[in-house]
Image (cartoon, rainbow, N blue to C red):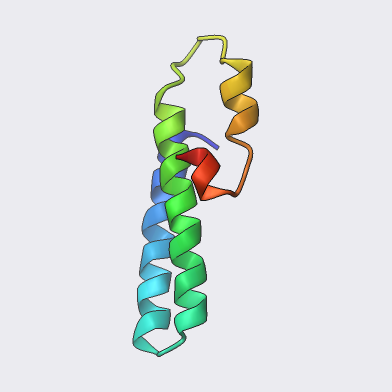
């Protein structure tokens, strides 16, 4: 998944969260907002890696997490 894919996914998940929120499905909306936040942070990380560059192994390994505090 690249930066553009992640940014697209953020937009989709935000729309879905809005639908759930409006239908008072707060737990689902909360979950999807967390997922959108994770994808947004990963898009920022992906922005640091340029095409044809050999990626920083530590950065690549550290970004494979679902913990927002670690991604930040």
Residue 14 placement, left or right of 58:
left
Q: Assign the C terminus to one quadrant of the image.
A: top left
Residue 7, image x, y percentages: 39, 45
Q: Residue at x 51, y 9 (%)?
A: 53
The answer, for residue 15, to whether it is visible in the render is: yes
Q: Residue 23, relative to residue 58: is it above or below?
A: below
Q: Residue 47, relative to residue 57: is it above or below?
A: below
- Looking at the image, how many numbered discs can be counted on the residues? 0
The part of the image, by quadrant, that contains residue 58 is: top right
Q: Assign the N terminus to one quadrant of the image.
A: top right
The part of the image, by quadrant, that contains residue 62 is: top right
Work out which residue is located at the far bottom of the displayed protein and give it.
Answer: 24
Q: Residue at x 42, y 71 (%)?
A: 16
Work out which residue is located at the far top of the displayed protein and give it.
Answer: 53
Q: Residue 8, relative to residue 16: is it above or below?
A: above
Q: Residue at x 45, y 75 (%)?
A: 29
The answer, for residue 9, to whether it is visible in the render is: no
Residue 8, image x, y percentages: 40, 49
Q: Residue at x 46, y 44 (%)?
A: 6
The part of the image, by quadrant, that contains residue 4 is: top left
Residue 27, image x, y percentages: 51, 79
Q: Residue 27, relative to residue 50: is it above or below?
A: below
């Amino acid at each position: 998944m690249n930066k553009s894919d992640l940014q697209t996914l953020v937009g989709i998940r935000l729309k879905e969260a809005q639908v759930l929120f409006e239908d008072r499905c707060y737990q689902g909306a909360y979950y999807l907002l967390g997922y959108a936040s994770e994808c947004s942070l990963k898009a920022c990380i992906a922005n640091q890696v340029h095409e044809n560059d050999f990626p920083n192994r530590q950065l690549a390994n550290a970004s494979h997490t679902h913990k927002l505090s670690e991604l930040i």
